[in-house]
Image: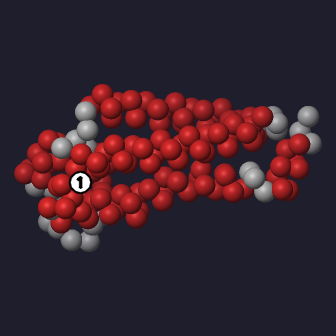
Amino acid sequence: MAEIEQLHTAMPFGDGEMSEELLKQLDATAPPIWLSSIASSLITVLSMFLMYAGAGLLKRVPSARRALLVWSVLYIIATITAAIISWIPRMNLVQENSEVHGMFLAQIVISMPMYLVLPVFLLIYLNKKQVRNEVSLWR
């Protein structure tokens, strides 16, 4: 719910604070808590893997490039899947309530691109010919 509340503050319309009724509706349509816990745990594991792969890149370990590419793909998939899991049960509410619709759009237009900047950058940068040639010399 914390991310949903943050999305509410990104909207230029509404009352500023979410009403109790809206909070109850969002809570009633939320995905199962165990699913959210698994998604959070997966993001935590991916974050630790990113630290490990980033350290390998700093040490010029040849497999670090491949590890970062794998991380990028997995993180993109996990982020998009988490958003889908969060919003699919709430789609009726999105269509009925303009505040929830605004939060949905804020997730798609503001939050998702911010989450995906690093993995997309890594996919592009680490696949450049010059970078691949440089990494091939790290033996």
Q: Amino acid at mark 1?
A: Met
For this orientation, the residue located farthest to the bottom is 12
Quadrant placement of the C terminus: top right
For image coordinates 48% across by 59% down, the residue present is 113
Where is residue 66 drawn, in percent x and y?
73, 39
Say above or below: 30 vs 112. Answer: above
Colouring method of the image = secondary structure
Determine which quarter of the picture holds residue 2.
Answer: top left
For image coordinates 82% across by 52% down, the residue present is 131
Count of all numbered marks drawn on residues in the image: 1
For image coordinates 83% across by 56% down, the residue present is 129
Please tell me which residue lies in front, 85 or 3. 85
Q: Secondary structure at mark 1?
A: helix
From the viewer's perspective, is 131 left or right of 15?
Answer: right
Determine which quarter of the picture holds residue 58.
Answer: top right
How crowded pointer 1 is (Cα within 10 Å; few <14, some 14-19, many 20+) is rated as some
Quadrant placement of the N terminus: top left
Where is residue 101 drawn, in percent x and y?
24, 63
- Name the residue that disc number 1 marks: 91
From the viewer's perspective, is 66 left or right of 39?
Answer: right
Q: Is residue 100 visible?
A: no
Where is residue 28 drawn, in percent x and y?
14, 41
For this orientation, the residue located farthest to the left is 21
Q: Is residue 13 visible?
A: yes
Say above or below: 102 vs 63. Answer: below
